[in-house]
Amino acid sequence: MKLNEKGLTLVEVVASLLIITIVLLSVAQLVIQSNKTNSINNEKLVVIDLAETILERLKAENHIVKEAIETSSNPDQEVEIPLSSINMENLSTKKIDGKDCYFVEMNHETYQVSAYARKANKQEISDFGLRPVVVKVKRVEIITNGTTSIKDLIGKSEIEGYVEL
């Protein structure tokens, strides 16, 4: 008696389903991880772009840096640059712990921005009338419950450039 072997047995079907499930779970983990990485990289690009924008505004409006250095009690040290004079429509100022803090609202997120003029460590840079400026940007959450506080979130950048005085 000869058996007809045209179909699949139940064991073969279950084994193939198990193999397909394992492959699909591996691919799903890869997709989830790449999505997380994409989100983190997107946040890094936003803060870097914002820091570069602030630095370019300071280069264009170099009188802000010059005034900050001239009014500083110790201009040879790191001088904080007040950003309230920068011409940016989404830049706001809040007093936190008696200090002016600058924030940019963008993409439904809040970013804290600060800028500092550093002492030129090479004489050639000073001879050209340039001053190193550092711009720091970090994504934050502003918490207001009686007092205002800032919670740091993922995403921060620090860039340095030169502003002509």
Image: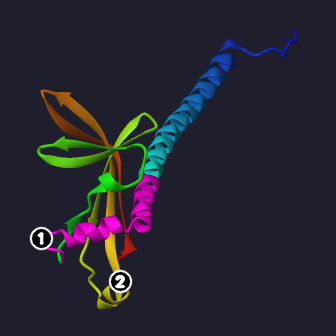
Judge whether 58 appears above or below 31 on screen. Answer: below
Mark 1 — residue?
Answer: 73
Residue lying at 18% horizontally and 74% vertically, measured from the top left: 75
Query: Where does the image place residue 147, in percent across and percent down from the top left?
Result: 13, 32
Chain-order first, disc 1 or disc 2: 1
The residue positioned 18% from the left and 43% from the top of the image is 95
Depicted 100 relative to depicted 81: above or below: above
The Cα atoms of the two marked residues, 1 and 2, are separated by 20 Å
Q: To which residue does mark 2 refer?
A: 129
Q: Is residue 50 magenta-colored? A: yes
Residue furthest to the top: 1
Q: Which amino acid does label 1 sit on?
A: Ser
- Residue 57 image point, x, y percent: 43, 60
Quarter in which the N terminus is drawn: top right
Q: Which of 85 and 109 is in front in this view?
A: 85
**Label 1: element kind:** loop
Determine crowd level at label 1: few under 14, some 14-19, many 20+ residues with C-alpha closer than 10 A: few
The kind of residue tagged 2 is Gly
Under tag 2, what secondary structure?
loop
Q: In which quarter of the image is the C terminus?
A: bottom left
Of residue 165 and residue 37, the one placed in the foreground of this image is 165
User: In the drawing, does residue 124 fall left or right of residue 36?
Assistant: left
Q: Is the stretch drawn in magenta largely helix, strand or loop?
A: helix
Q: In the image, residue 21 lies at what x, y percent?
A: 59, 25
The x and y percentages for residue 7 are: 80, 14
Report crowding for label 2: few under 14, some 14 to 19, many 20 or more residues within 10 A (C-alpha): few
Magenta residues (range): 48-75
Q: Picture quarter containing residue 115?
A: bottom left
